[in-house]
Image (cartoon, helix red, strand yellow):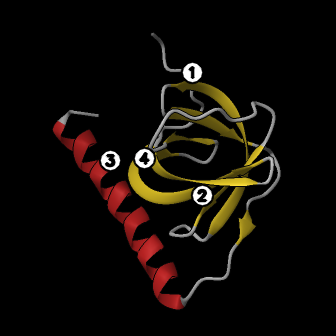
Amino acid sequence: MPDRRQNARDKVIYGGVAESDGATRDCVVRNISENGASLEFSNVIKLPREQMSLKIARKGQSFLAKVVWWRDNFVGVAFRAEAPVELPVSDLEERLRKSEKKKRQLQRRIKELIGEG
């Protein structure tokens, strides 16, 4: 099956909160890109396809998202075109995010150099 994503996704394990129809549900963000994410919930879940809110405290952002696919308790979402809402974060969290981003870039570069990417 061809990958139709516009951007490569980074494998992560972030805690997230999905909100739709006034209900909130905790989830785990398994991978993320600029345009979307893959979420895992603790049990099978039904979400509205049209719009939901996804908050990721570790990234300090909140996204409006549209459900693209789901299978059991796994859900793929595409972020809406609106800019993500920045949540207040401390200096330490910002430095940690930058460090994690740099680590992912270096991991990709290493894979390219050794011929795995």
| Mark 1: secondary structure | loop
Pair 2/4: label in front: 2
Mark 4 and 1 residues: CB-CB less than 8 Å, in contact? Answer: no
Query: Which quadrant would the N terminus be assigned to in this image?
Result: top left
Q: Amino acid at mark 3?
A: Arg
Q: Amino acid at mark 2?
A: Val
* Residue count near mark 1 (Cα–Cα under 10 Å), binned few <14, some 14–19, many ≥20: few
Residue holding disc 1:
4
Please say if 97 is above or below 53: below
**Left or right side of 114 for 14:** right
Image coordinates of residue 46 in percent, x first then y, are: 64, 32
Question: Residue lying farthest top?
Answer: 1
The residue that appears at 65% across and 66% down in the rendered structure is 61
Q: Which mark is residue 108?
A: 3
Marks 2/3: CA–CA distance: 28 Å
Marks 2/4: CA–CA distance: 19 Å
Please say if 97 is above or below 26: below
Marks 2/1: CA–CA distance: 25 Å
* Residue count near mark 4 (Cα–Cα under 10 Å), binned few <14, some 14–19, many ≥20: some
Residue holding disc 4:
10
